[in-house]
Image: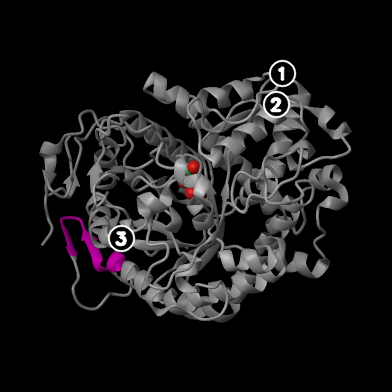
Amino acid sequence: MFCHQKRERKRGTGCGRIGNRRSARLDLFTTYFAEPCAPLLCALRVAVMERSAGGGGSGLLRLRALGFTLAVASIGSAAAITRRDFPEGFVFGAGTSAFQVEGAWDEDGKKPSIWDTLCSGPRHRRCHCRPVSQVQGTLVSKLNELEDVKLMHEMGLDAYRFSIAWTRIIPDGRGAVNPKGLEYYNNLIDELLRYVSFPNLSYRLTDELPAASGIQPHVTIYHFDLPQALQDEYDGVLSPRFIDDFTAYAEVCFRSFGDRVKHWTTLNEPNIEPLGGFDLGFLPPRRCSSPFGYACNGGNSTTEPYIAAHHLLIAHASTVSLYRVKYQATQGGQIGIVFLAFWYEPSTRKPKDVAAAGRMMDFSLGWFLHPLVYGDYPAVMRRNAGSRLPTLTDEVSARVRGSFDFVGINHYGALEVEADLSQLKQTLRDYTADTAAKILTFPFQSLTKQLGLGIQSNEAPSSMQKLLDYLKLKYRNPPVVIYENGVGDKPDPSGRFVTDDEFRTHYLQGYIEATLLSIRNGSNVHGYFVWSFMDVFELLFAYRFRFGLYGVDFGAEEKTRYARHSAQWYAGFLHGGELRPATPSLSSIRTYIL
Ligand code: NOJ
């Protein structure tokens, strides 16, 4: 399926009160958010604290400036891994998403998404959640779009994952299409396809685009940024009306870009949006109910997460069905969906903790993957959530089952879990209480620890193997693309550019090796994408946590990019070097740009 890659290319606080009972989970949060926080983070922090307390549960180093194209590491031992070890057609890429990089949130006809609204409110301006002041008017991606694509090419990316901002294309969420929005994405896609690589030659085409060339666009249709207009009109994903509006928007994307885009994903992390947006309420539209969330705009945490997810699932299936009926045969693309997929590790070998970890897998990944593969929600969800979990009628179930060509996963490691069956005794339960499990580690714990230590824990990459094995055994080994894997760090408080991110290189090396081992063990993996290509506005941490291979100087008007160590290493690997080169050296760089 992922065979568009040319053969030649295969070479290579102060906010909130703390409860009395502290837990590991609470300590992690207080440590991590020790500084005054944005309301977004305050909400998250307080929500977690309440739950924990028993409440319910220099220099610029630019590769381009150095004429960087090829960084080929020395040949090492026979066991050394290079990209040639991956199956033919395997795609290596990196990604971003629209809201997190584009800026220009109200320019050229674009209207606000729920994220623009969240981040432009007066309360949010004061704190760390500042995408408007940081991004608005800078046109981060627009100004740099052409240069970014050049950097991607020089890095050797086979593919770039990005998302389309719904309100740039259809400003009111439904109805009139904005030609300026189409133009923006058309330019980006064309620019990606213009770059062609051969073993000893790379160039940018100036004339017509060949049928299969360039950097493949892998496009996410929806990455959390729901049109505010639809939120206002009918509560967005809480209404079944979302299904038709989303499908119609997706059709505009297929019609406008499908001649060139061959890899689509409908939704990014629909297994997270209902939790952040409708249970704990720390993500827009910030709905939740007491005692499960904090300072929300109405909501019902016991039911709404399940309803939102249900509509997202059906909207996905309806879009895939449309694509298959009207576009796939002529456009020849593939369509999937992307999930946040932590591996849940039992804290002990006790059967109850092992069962709790299994439940977490069902509640997180199975919530969507079970219906997609077997046509219904996991039995344990039905048991624990009862009638609060919507029913998939026979007709809907048949539409949902099999509605994917591949599964995208965003994988950041493992979370430790123990059983907490007492939660099932509560009569008022939200999604989290329904899991009857307690997560003992905060998602970014390994990262913060790792920041202290300077390297990633050795065991962590095995979470990728466990996850891929799980997909193989439980979900019939679907074609998988790893759409996000990466690690964040804090920016230097002095504003100095941080280029020495060997810990990131080390992290990525571990996960890429784990991916290869899984493939050798029979997993059906077709691609691997680093999150993120460059620093982005991080959803929970704003600009206080950076994931980029490329750093971004957010203080500069042009938002200048600078290459980190990890960018150089990834480029070396993608150009045929070893996964773990002995001495990655810029002296081996040679330029072939014509
Ligand atoms: C999940 C999301 O898809 C992305 O938007 C976010 O920046 C990263 N993972 C890191 O948290």
Under circle 1, the secondary element is loop
Structural crowding at the residue carrying mark 3, measured as other residues with C-alpha within 10 Å and reported as few (<14), some (14–19) or many (≥20) = few
Residue under the point 21% across and 35% down: 75
Q: Position of residue 69 (x, y in %)?
A: 17, 50
Residue under the point 33% across and 45% down: 83
The residue to which callout 1 is attached is: 21
- Going by the numbered disc 1, the residue's amino acid type is Arg
Residue under the point 40% across and 79% down: 179
- Going by the numbered disc 3, the residue's amino acid type is Arg
- Going by the numbered disc 2, the residue's amino acid type is Ser
* Beta carbon at label 2 within 8 Å of ligand 1: no
Mark 3 → mark 2, Cα distance in angstroms: 53 Å
The quadrant in which residue 547 appears is: top left
Q: Is residue 582 visible?
A: yes
Instruction: Tell me the magenta residue range.
Output: 191-203
Mark with earlier residue (1, 2): 1
Q: Position of residue 493 (x, y in %)?
A: 32, 29
**Number of numbered labels in the structure image:** 3
The residue to which callout 3 is attached is: 7
Mark 1 → mark 2, Cα distance in angstroms: 7 Å
Foreground residue among 153 and 282: 282
Residue under the point 62% across and 54% down: 285
The residue to which callout 2 is attached is: 52
Q: Is residue 238 left or right of residue 196?
A: right
